[in-house]
Amino acid sequence: MSLKYIGLNLIKKTEESKRQKEDIELLVDYIESLFLFFPQPFIFLNPLGKILKVNEAFLRLTDYQFFEVIGSSVEEFFLEKDVFEIFLKNRKTEKQEFTLISREKRISVILYLSSVKDEEENIIGYFLAISEIEEFKERLQEKTRYLADAQKALLNILEDINESRNMLIKTF
């Protein structure tokens, strides 16, 4: 085998390696952009529950600034102070209802926690997705009130019908 052939193979492998590295960098940039601008609030946590990264949707929902959130414990932003503990006990993707504390108000949310693992299955962090359910709960309460009012109206109608029936029976 000639040195020229070996040199050409090395150049070819180097070019392939460079192309693969560029592809990986593009993929990382794409994932970063997707994470930052995804419409659902997301938080990336370290294994101890400290916030490493949040997306724009989380900042809009809570009215906090990026620097106010990064490095904080995730539990500082929830009324229930055992948020992270609850999820760690289950060690699986789980959804549960919690109360998010924004700058202005408290918001009912459903949280989804999923662990991020390395090649050896060691947990290197967590993704925490947040779904706001405040609007849904308000609509549910509104419909419940409407049904309760409709039920009262129906009971009143039944009472009136029953009274009329009794009066008719008395008159005959």
Image (cartoon, grey):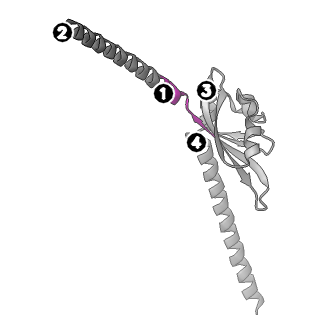
Q: Nearer the viewer, residue 47 or 96?
A: 96
Viewer can see residue 97: yes
Q: Label 2, label 3: how many angstroms apart (C-alpha)?
A: 62 Å
Q: Label 2, label 4: how many angstroms apart (C-alpha)?
A: 76 Å
Vertical comparison of 156 with 125: above or below: above
Measuring from the top left, give residue 146's x and y in whole percent: 41, 21
- What type is the residue that disc 3 sits on? Ile
- What type is the residue that disc 2 sits on? Phe
Question: Circle 3 — which element?
Answer: strand
Measuring from the top left, give residue 70's x and y in whole percent: 75, 35
Q: Nearer the viewer, mark 2 or mark 3?
A: 2
Q: Which residue is painted at 27% across and 11% down in the image? A: 166
Q: What residue is shown with label 2?
A: 172
Q: Nearer the viewer, residue 141 or 151?
A: 151
Q: Quadrant of residue 131?
A: top right
Comes first in the chain, label 2 or label 4: 4
Mark 2 is surrounded, within 10 Å at the Cα level, by few (under 14), some (14 to 19) or many (20 or more) other residues, namely few
Q: Label 1, label 3: how many angstroms apart (C-alpha)?
A: 15 Å
Q: Nearer the viewer, mark 2 or mark 1?
A: 2
Vertical comparison of 136 with 116: above or below: above
- Is 137 inside the magenta-drawn segment? yes
Q: Label 3, label 4: how many angstroms apart (C-alpha)?
A: 21 Å
- What type is the residue that disc 1 sits on? Leu
* Span shown in magenta: 129-141
Measuring from the top left, give residue 101's x and y in whole percent: 67, 26
